[in-house]
Amino acid sequence: MELRNISTFIRAAALGNFARTAEELGYAPSTVTTQIQQLEEELGFPLFDRIGKRVSLTSLGQQFLAYANEMDSLSEKAKLLGVEPHNIRGNLRVGTLESLFSAVLLPLLPKYSSEFPNVTLDFKTAPSQELFSMLKRNELDIIFVLDRKIVERDCIRAYANLENLVFVCTAGHPLAGRRNVPLSALLEQPLILTEKIGLYRHALEELAASQNLLVQPYMAIDNTGFIITLVKQGLGISYLPEYAVRSFVDSGKLAVIQADVPPVRFLSQLFYYKNKWISPQLQGLISLIASRADG
């Protein structure tokens, strides 16, 4: 059983399209078809149902996929026998939220690059739901998201850390340094928030609703970095994850407003697909992110 045929099968199962599989792997479409047919002849049963340009796994194809992933993982493990982490080559595909990428991952990259200098990191920033879909299609190796505790079928959570949401303003703002500021007073300020479907915005609206208050933002922007820039310019206050603003608070550019509201916390969480082999470069990233909680 050819390993290249196994790899082609795994990718075709993820994409559901032989033409896209051929394009990604650099094969002619006929090559993908031939490789799948060779596998089906060896196994004695069809792996895919063909409906137009789309293909989907048969029930036996779904069962075989678990074995194919194991064989592919064993092949990758064998290739790394005796190879030091410093000499490992390859790609690591990481999906994450924009705020986690800029505030958490970026500061860790120099250390990761020193440990795995020959590993290429491919990042994709997107909402959590899209990242989970890409993970299950094997388009990403791991995802880093922020939400309430997530239990996702066929996915393994490798790490979780509690993250606080805080109100922030410029250091010279009248509310900076004040304690027990009522939510009603905060909502009277010019608010620069994420869009209505955003996680932080929804959390604030829940707080407001519990006190029969309305959230009416001055600006709505779907980018945490842009929001922080506008707050630093004194155009308003915002409600963001503490990790996203920590460096600016520490440097005196922003200040946290001590609000008289119940604490709101979410979990930053790392997920990989259950059949995923944890390569040294993947374990290295997991360990590095987990170390921030230990520190």
Image (cartoon, helix red, strand yellow):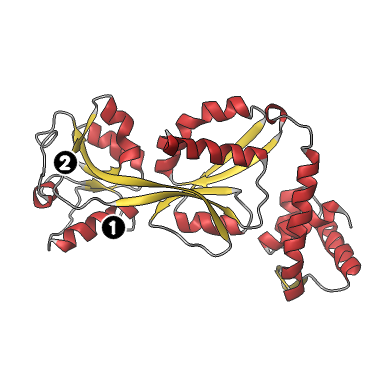
Q: Position of residue 12 (x, y in %)?
A: 73, 60
- Asked whether, in this view, residue 136 is left or right of residue 89, the answer is left
Query: Residue 18: image x %, image y %?
Result: 74, 61
Residue 101, picture quadrant: top left
In the picture, measured across the screen, residue 144 lies left or right of residue 284, that is left
Nearer to me, 169 or 234: 169
Q: Residue at x 71, y 32 (%)?
A: 88
Q: Quadrant of residue 68?
A: bottom right
Judge by depth and name the residue closer to the eye, 144 or 225.
144
- Dot 2: within a 10 Å radius of its alpha carbon, few (fewer than 14), some, or many (20 or more) residues? some
Tell me the mark number nearer the camera, choosing from 2 and 1. 2
Q: Which residue is mark 2?
A: 258
Q: How many marks?
A: 2
Q: Which numbered dot is residue 202?
A: 1
179 lies above or below 131 = above
Q: Please tell me which residue lies in front, 192 or 116.
A: 116
Q: In the picture shown, does residue 257 fall above or below 59?
A: above
Residue lying at 67% horizontally and 60% vertically, measured from the top left: 14
**Marks 2 and 1, how far apart in space?**
20 Å
On residue 211, which mark appears? none
Question: Mark 2 falls on what kind of element?
Answer: loop
Bin the neighbour count of mark 1 within 10 Å (Cα to Cα): few under 14, some 14-19, many 20 and up. some
Q: Residue 239, percent across and down?
A: 25, 46
Q: Position of residue 262 (x, y in %)?
A: 20, 53
User: Residue at horizontal 77%, vertical 37%?
Assistant: 80
**Identity, as a three-letter code, of the amino acid under mark 2:** Gln
Extreme-front residue of the structure: 294
- Quadrant position of the C terminus in the picture: top left
Q: Secondary structure at mark 1?
A: helix
Q: Amino acid at mark 1?
A: His
